[in-house]
């Protein structure tokens, strides 16, 4: 390297690196202007910083204990943290590629329309408790807070797993059904009191114990509980009012127990003579309810805290609002945040200062206390040790050993406190504090859970706000919007060169962004030249007017809805695939057309019977077939029944009732006779489809009645014709039998003269052979041959008469031989008529 040239990489007016250019062979400086080097340095510096910020944002998603995700208005997740994938069992890739609706229980879709319905828009922060389906098929309850940000095209979501809470609620429901109930009775005339054994057990009294009425009232806690039950007894005695109360009592063993007491008075001649009622031990349920109420209040607070962090414009506003909310929820007198400021010589010398504070009314604030600013936290090992390890720190003024820290507590009138670390990127950013200035309080696990959640969200919020503030200058808003919209989008210049191509455009048009950017649009989509795409885009560019149209693109077999907006010499095109919509419209038109033609073609009488109300609709076919006017002559099912043929009424009525009563029957099919408007009857075929409710009760029957009178007449004619044919067949059988017998007898009688002729001709030829010339021999030959052929014909006639009487064995016939026999038989006629018989190969 002969010469080098350095360009500083700048971000926020700070050098974060150097780009070095080197030359070899000749000592020369690169030809770079000052302006160009500044642009290069600023651009590369910002790009490096953007990558760092993306890594920091990933840390936020990774460290958050609860579900954090970002969704688009198209119904798909855009980002998801590991807590979500761990909870639901899916990989991040599976969740990002699948519509959000598939993860949400179908019964909860209505609660999350802003996540799953692209056509539903809402800008309101929302909180819902919904069910998610894990990959294994199990259900997880989540407390979901959604915050739509339309200008970003995103919905920010935070969710808390509340499955245990929901399971506890179900357990509570089951427990209440198994509660013990005892009875009691007070006879006001004899002043006798009766308690059942369970009632004594509830009050933890010995078996057989019987109190007076006044003694029974003393079990209720002195104050409001005793006043309430005393007033209830007085109202029952004086006014006959019943009571049903849930109150705490103090048992005989000094234990507090919640009971449900129910009572009412009995009167005789206007005077109350007796009180009766029951006791139910609801202590476990009540304690669970109180615990659930507290837990629900805590979960609600956590959700509201998330919403405050998401909505607040400044971190200071968020801190003030959340501190007040959390302080009132846990009953703290003071809530504050100490923020780390510097590390003088390592973590052990970390400096912290009081940054934010909220105090209950009447509590002295410490925000202006100089002693709580810029002090080294490691000086107080009692709190530094657990906080530096990510653990909560607790202290009460009477038991604290660190005198310096005890002095601080006394100076702020603190009886007990709870401190929780706020950790970001494995670094202690500070700690949250909660003071009780009235009591030396033992902080419950529920309190710690709520406050730890707040510390986690606070760490996430610090990271998110820091990231957003720095990211705002390095990420172009245009790319974020165009990549998150639900439409395909691309932009071209006036020459047709593609200057932008979003992800959805890649998916819809099957062309990668890297392959088309910088190229001419029409070189890639040559088939579109001459179509509306080409004409409309060019019109918009030339006229400056936006265009909106729908067009089919044959190469992709798709319909597109397109909106193109010109800006200067550029054109932005938004488009979406509407192929399914077009196909549905076509099918709907075809279906409607078929239905209309079918309705016009049918001659059936259509009906729709609402069984429970008795209302029935009769189609126009009743006018065509039977002459009745729909809605006038036939006003209900009874009018149909009255028009049945008297001989068919009972049979059809029972058949209809059997079909309706059988929960498995869904079809009623019968033939009967129906009276027409002119009083005559038609044979009809009735086919009805039965609809039933979830209990199997018939609620509706729809069907059609066809007039089959013509068919019935044809059937009757066919029956009469069959009778005639059967008679004719019997007559033919007798005739055939007689003919067969005649043919048999005739054939034998005819053969005998032929044998005689043939025999005498042979004898003549034999005896006078030497006296006959050749012509005589020829005549004798012809006569004998004719006799033999006559005999053959007689035998064939006999055989023909037997056709159909026995099974025949069929086989091939030499038709050439048959033609020869016929020609020989009719030789004389052939010769006399001088006919010419021609045959081919037979």
Image: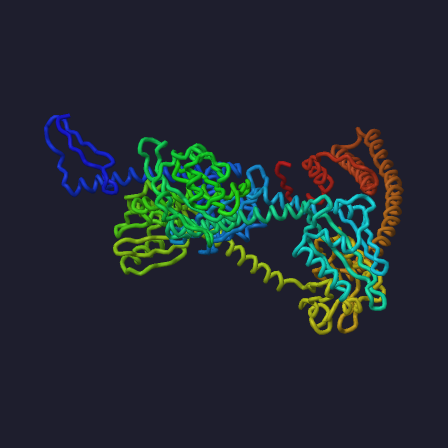
Residue 550 place in picture, x, y as percent: 41, 56
Decide which of 300, 5 is in the foreground and name it. Answer: 300
**Residue 558 drawn above or below residue 393:** below
Residue 355 place in picture, x, y as percent: 37, 46
**Residue 146 drawn above or below residue 808:** below
Decide which of 617, 155 is in the foreground and name it. Answer: 155
Question: Does residue 154 appear to the left or right of 571 in the view shown?
Answer: right
Q: Is residue 829 at all visible to an observer of this figure?
A: yes
Residue at 32% in and 47% down = 472
Q: What is the quadrant of residue 354 in the picture?
A: top left
Q: What is the quadrant of residue 653 in the picture?
A: bottom right
Position of the N terminus by quadrant: top left
Q: What is the quadrant of residue 700 in the picture?
A: bottom right
Question: Does residue 15 appear to the left or right of 229 in the view shown?
Answer: left
Residue at 34% in and 33% down = 349
Q: Is residue 552 at all visible to an observer of this figure?
A: no
Residue 608 place in picture, x, y as percent: 69, 63
Position of the C terminus by quadrant: top right
Question: Does residue 243 appear to the left or right of 358 in the view shown?
Answer: right
**Residue 273 drawn above or below residue 173:** below
Residue 539 place in picture, x, y as percent: 30, 58
């Amino acid at each position: 390297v002969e010469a080098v040239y350095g360009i500083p990489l700048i971000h926020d007016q700070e050098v974060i690196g150097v780009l070095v250019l080197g030359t070899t062979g000749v000592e020369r400086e690169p030809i770079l202007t000052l302006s160009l080097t500044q642009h290069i340095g600023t651009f590369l510096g910002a790009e490096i910083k953007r990558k760092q910020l993306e890594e920091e944002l990933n840390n936020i998603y990774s460290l958050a204990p609860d579900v954090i995700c970002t969704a688009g208005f198209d119904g798909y997740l855009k980002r998801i943290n590991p807590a979500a994938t761990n909870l639901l069992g899916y990989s991040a890739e599976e969740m990002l590629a699948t519509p959000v609706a598939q993860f949400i229980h179908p019964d909860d879709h209505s609660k999350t329309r802003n996540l799953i319905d692209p056509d539903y828009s809402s800008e309101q922060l929302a909180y819902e408790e919904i069910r998610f389906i894990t990959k294994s098929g199990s259900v997880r309850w989540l407390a979901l807070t959604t915050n739509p940000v339309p200008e970003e095209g995103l919905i920010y979501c935070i969710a808390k797993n509340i499955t245990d809470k929901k399971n506890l609620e179900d357990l509570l429901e089951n427990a209440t059904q198994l509660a013990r109930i005892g009875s009691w009775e007070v006879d006001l005339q004899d002043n006798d009191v009766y308690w059942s054994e369970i009632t004594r057990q509830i009050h933890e009294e010995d078996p057989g114990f019987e109190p007076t009425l006044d003694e029974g009232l003393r079990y209720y806690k002195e104050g409001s509980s005793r006043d309430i039950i005393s007033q209830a007894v007085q109202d029952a005695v004086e006014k006959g009012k019943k009571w049903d109360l849930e109150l705490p009592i103090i048992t005989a063993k000094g234990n507090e127990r919640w009971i449900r007491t129910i009572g009412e008075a009995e009167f005789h001649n206007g005077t109350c003579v007796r009180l009766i009622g029951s006791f139910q031990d609801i202590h476990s349920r009540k304690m669970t309810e109180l615990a659930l109420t507290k837990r629900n209040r805590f979960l609600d607070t956590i959700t509201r805290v998330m919403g405050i962090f998401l909505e607040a414009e400044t971190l200071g506003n968020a801190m003030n609002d959340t501190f007040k909310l959390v302080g009132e929820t846990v009953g703290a007198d003071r809530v504050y945040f100490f923020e780390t400021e510097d590390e003088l010589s390592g973590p052990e010398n970390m400096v912290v200062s009081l940054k934010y504070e909220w105090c209950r009314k009447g509590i002295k604030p410490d925000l202006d206390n100089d002693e709580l600013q810029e002090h080294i936290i490691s000086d107080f090992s009692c709190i530094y040790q657990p906080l530096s390890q990510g653990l909560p720190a607790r202290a009460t003024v009477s038991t604290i050993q660190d005198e310096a820290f005890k002095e601080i507590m006394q100076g702020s009138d603190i009886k007990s406190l709870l401190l929780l670390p706020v950790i970001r990127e494995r670094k202690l950013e500070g700690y949250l504090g909660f003071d009780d200035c009235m009591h030396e309080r033992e902080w419950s696990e529920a309190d710690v859970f709520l406050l730890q959640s707040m510390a986690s969200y606070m760490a996430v919020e610090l990271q998110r706000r820091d990231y957003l503030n720095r990211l705002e200058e390095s990420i172009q808003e245009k790319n974020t919007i165009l990549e998150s919209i639900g439409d395909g989008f691309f932009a071209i210049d006036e020459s047709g060169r593609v200057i932008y191509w979003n992800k959805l455009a890649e998916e819809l048009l099957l062309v990668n962004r890297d392959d088309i950017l910088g190229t001419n649009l029409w070189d890639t989509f040559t088939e579109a030249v001459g179509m509306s795409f080409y004409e409309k885009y060019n019109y918009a560019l030339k006229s400056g007017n936006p265009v909106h149209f729908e067009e089919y693109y044959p190469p992709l077999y798709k319909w597109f809805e397109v909106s193109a907006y010109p800006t200067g010499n550029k054109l932005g095109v938004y488009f979406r695939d509407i192929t399914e919509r077009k196909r549905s419209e076509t099918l709907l038109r075809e279906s409607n057309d078929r239905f209309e033609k079918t309705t016009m073609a049918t001659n059936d009488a259509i009906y729709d019977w609402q069984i429970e109300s008795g209302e029935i609709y009769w189609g126009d076919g009743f006018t065509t077939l039977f002459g009745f006017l729909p809605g006038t002559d036939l006003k209900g099912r009874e009018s149909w029944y009255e028009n049945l043929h008297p001989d068919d009424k009972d049979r059809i009525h029972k058949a209809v009732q059997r079909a309706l009563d059988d929960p498995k029957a869904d079809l009623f099919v019968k033939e009967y006779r129906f009276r027409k408007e002119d009083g005559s009857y038609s044979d009809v075929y009735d086919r009805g489809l039965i609809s039933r409710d979830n209990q199997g009760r018939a609620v509706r029957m729809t069907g059609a009645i066809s007039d089959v009178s013509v068919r019935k007449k044809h059937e009757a004619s066919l029956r009469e014709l069959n009778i005639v044919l059967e008679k004719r067949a019997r007559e033919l059988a007798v005739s055939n039998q007689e003919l067969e017998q005649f043919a048999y007898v005739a054939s034998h009688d005819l053969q005998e003269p032929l044998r005689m002729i043939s025999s005498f001709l042979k004898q003549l030829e034999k005896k006078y052979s030497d006296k006959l010339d050749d012509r005589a021999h020829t005549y004798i030959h012809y006569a004998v041959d004719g006799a033999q052929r006559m005999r053959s014909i007689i035998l064939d006639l006999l055989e023909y008469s037997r056709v159909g009487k026995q099974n025949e064995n069929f086989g091939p016939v030499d038709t050439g031989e048959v033609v020869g026999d016929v020609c020989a038989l009719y030789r004389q006629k052939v010769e006399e008529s001088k006919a010419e018989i021609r045959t081919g190969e037979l």
